[in-house]
Amino acid sequence: MEKRGLAPIRLKIQIIYTILTNGYLYGYISGKIYKGGMKYACVPGLNCYSCPGALGSCPMGALQNALNEQNLKVPFGVLGFLFFFGSLFGRFVCGFLCPFGLVQDLLHRIPLLKKYKRKRLPFHQVLKYGKYPVLLGLVILGSSVLFTGYVKMPAFCKYLCPSGTLMGALPLMGTNSQLRSLAGGLFGWKLGVLVLLLIVSVMVYRPFCQYLCPLGAIYGWFNRFSLVQIQWTKEACISCGACQNACPLQLTPPEISVSPECIKCGQCIKACPAHCLQYKSMGGNKLNSNDIVTDITEDM
Amino acid sequence: MTYWQKKSSGKKTPPVWAVGLCLGLLFLGLGIYEGDLTAIYKKAVMICLECIGIG
């Protein structure tokens, strides 16, 4: 792996991934959604399956749909996708493979409201746990016990998910007058949530990912042991703080990669003057030549 | 544990990510058997009214 990591090409990867997974152009023109076989599979990131261009299924939507079943059973299919992507990537998915993450990244680049630009919201240490109540309350409990009439509802999608509003509702309503005529108070609420998050994204780095995303909460649990890791070589570290300054989430070197907040964007690797941070796959028990030399001299 | 101790111990435990990956594949297999993927597909090919703020 190149020393400077993937950070310089992250934006390109995000854009290419978003186009590839939302490339059903006919859907944008016709106001209809893709109905092909690729929708049997979930994509790794938060990607509304009602986006006219979406070629895959959203893992959060699919999880809630499984919990909406009258006879509660373990949703093995969705768990399979989550374990698969989580074990390989952890929150690397958030950094590289999430269209809504890309939108927030682009908004944060806008050189407006510079005076208010910050990496975190006040009370970050408390607010960062907000994604767990969203996961437990809206996604799991909400989808299991809340009803619309006699039908259970996907509570997260219905009341919070900004990806559904941005990538699903707006393009569909733009081309489908029937849907537009049905928009009411709930749509107004969801649009309000989206607009608020988009405005805050200009000032704060990825507010939805940091404080609200239930998928980020799930992948955060995998972060510590996923295949893709950023390795910090403590011995080579000169404690200059460049990595923490460059980190969009202000993580310290021991937190990088293992913290549930780290999205493995690689900015720390790019910033490190001592080259003590690098992408590495986990589990190889790799030791460098210096360690071996040290061991030999200790044995002697 | 030093490099040489690791080398001579002979025990190879699979990395945790590999266990997670195998679990993921097992769950996917179970999901296919239980028809979960068909349920995902059926939901994904209809416009989700809740997702777009109508339902």
Image: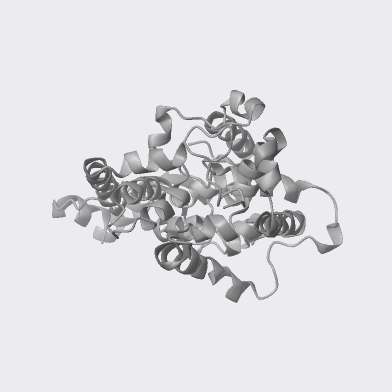
Depicted A172 relative to depicted A134: above or below: above
Q: Is residue A13 visible?
A: yes
The residue closer to the viewer here, A254 or A27, is: A27
**In screen coordinates, is A291 left or right of A24?**
left
Q: How many marks?
A: 0
The residue closer to the viewer here, A129 or A222, is: A129
Depicted A238 relative to depicted A293: above or below: below
The residue closer to the viewer here, A27 or A218, is: A27
Depicted A134 relative to depicted A102: above or below: below
Quarter of the C terminus of chain A within the rendering: bottom left
- Residue A89 location in percent, x, y? 43, 47
- Residue closest to the far top: A26
- Residue A145 location in percent, x, y? 41, 67
- Residue A130 location in percent, x, y? 56, 69
The image's colour scheme reads one colour
Q: Is residue A235 visible?
A: no
- Residue closest to the far front: A149
Determine the image quadrant of residue A122: bottom right
Determine the image quadrant of residue A239: bottom right
Q: Name the residue at 61% across, 25% down.
A: A25
- Residue A102 location in percent, x, y? 63, 44
**In screen coordinates, is A7 left or right of A134?**
right
